Amino acid sequence: MRATFNTFVHNLDLAYFLRTRHDHAMSALRWVAILVPMAAAVGSLCAAFLWSLDAATKLRFAYPWLLMLLPIGGFAIGLLYHAMGRSVEGGNNLIVEQIHEPGGGVPLRMAPLIFIGTVATHLFGGSAGREGTAVQLGGSLASAFGRLCRLDASSTRILLMAGIAAGFGAVFGTPLAGAVFALEVLAIGRVQYGALVPCLIAGVAGDWTCQLWGIHHTPYRIDYLAESVGPVAVQLLLLVEAAVAGIAFGLVGLLFAEANHMLGDRVKKLVAYPPLRPLLGGVAVIALVYLFGTRDYLGLGVWSPDPHAATIAGFFAPGTDYWSWALKLLFTVVTLSFGFKGGEVTPLFFIGAALGHTLGALFGAPIGLFAALGFIAVFAGAANTPLACTIMGIELFGATHAVYFATACFVAYLCSGHSGIYLSQRLAVPKTPAHDLLPETTLRGIRAARSPLLRRPPSRSDEDRRGRLE
């Protein structure tokens, strides 16, 4: 035995072992030195953004006449982007493209433009979210840090993913979901494990920084089985109902994504001058307000001074609100398709919670639980990120209902098809057999191939990519 041990020690290259550990340690310290300041900057900017968004929302409630300025505000946003932001008009899709194929980077001016545009949208009453803004803040600052630190293309790619994690984690208070979202959102069916630790560090640092600035996120609670024994509760009937609801959540996520893209394409074809699009969109939103006689579907929809208004928190309580999900979908699609700024995720939370409320009432199931399922699963279907959304459910609502969360999110993901809100997302592993789809095809390419109206002759880059794949 001693001879065997001596042979092992003799064969072991101690110098090589120590050198390797030293290189790993130095690399880790280098990444921490880059990631923590970057994530702290993103978290601070997200804190300022969330504070500004809350102030704008309070002003809109205090002065209802601000809604009448929505067309003028939309024109100003459109003019600002037309003059200074053409290179960043792609928003989240631009960041995803830069991660897939690093090129010119993400311009730093994306951050102030999306900040101003989103706050203005909410001030005047547009129905939009905040995730898109947080991701773009994170992506633009991460790109700037990458240029400052002179990182190579591979390291810049990781830093951009970490920027997404920091922004997402900070704006929703879900650092782990933010990290997994950044790894999962790039391609359907594939998780980018190469950036696992950097995204986790950035997500946690971004969230902590945002909280240190005094930002508090809306708490949600599921009363059903809150006192159950054990960490996880599963009942067969509820599990089946969660799976059936997941089908509806996935189809509504698909409906939202396709309606948003189709109306956006139509508006661009009909209105050639970009600043004019949000002006007309503002008029359309005002028309919807008067057509349905309510302002409940403006803004984020997280809270309202009117206790009877439809809000996300309200959907966790019993009631008979059956159509708020459809109306919020309509208001949001019109707002975003005409060029207003913001994100899709918080409206998807609203749509999902409202739909879950409806399905829970129809099934005779716990309303709060099904509102939570819809909250995360509609987003899972629309963004093709079931793992991140399952983890978000655990972070927001606790682990007791984790099996229901996973069931609803995974089923919604399968039922939303090869579609989604991020057109630069690529198809790595098809959800169903699809022999006519090339690997690494973008959702934009899938839509173009599916619709004759969107088809275009293949570009040189398309041919080059096809050649590489073959």
Image (tube, rainbow, N blue to C red):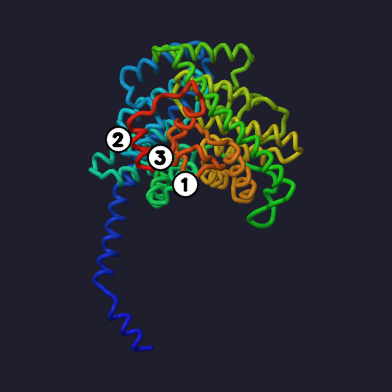
Considering only vertical position in the picture, is 188 above or below 351?
below
In the drawing, does residue 165 fall left or right of residue 237? Answer: left
Measured from the top left, where is residue 245 in percent x and y? 67, 38
Kindly identify the amino acid type of the residue bearing the numbered disc 1: Arg
Give the Cα separation between the discs numbered 1 and 2: 23 Å
Give the Cα separation between the discs numbered 3 and 1: 17 Å
Quadrant into which the C terminus falls: top left
Please tell me which residue lies in front, 113 or 431: 431
Measured from the top left, where is residue 304 in percent x and y? 58, 26
How would you rate the neighbour count of disc 3 (Cα within 10 Å): few for under 14, some for 14-19, many for 20 or more?
A: many
Marking on residue 105: 2
Instruction: Please report contact status of discs 1 and 2: CB closer than 8 Å, yes or no.
Output: no
Q: Identify the residue under disc 3.
A: 164
Looking at the image, tell me whether mark 3 or mark 1 is earlier in sequence order: 3
Toward which corner of the image does residue 393 lie, by quadrant? top right
Measured from the top left, where is residue 246 in percent x and y? 64, 39
Residue at coordinates 33% horizontally, 80% vertically from top-left?
A: 8
Give the Cα separation between the discs numbered 3 and 2: 14 Å
Kindly tell me whether residue 214 is visible in this rendering: no
In the drawing, does residue 372 fall left or right of residue 178? Answer: right
Dot 3 falls on a residue whose secondary structure is helix
Please tell me which residue lies in front, 332 or 34: 332
Q: Identify the residue under disc 1.
A: 190
Please tell me which residue lies in front, 417 or 205: 417
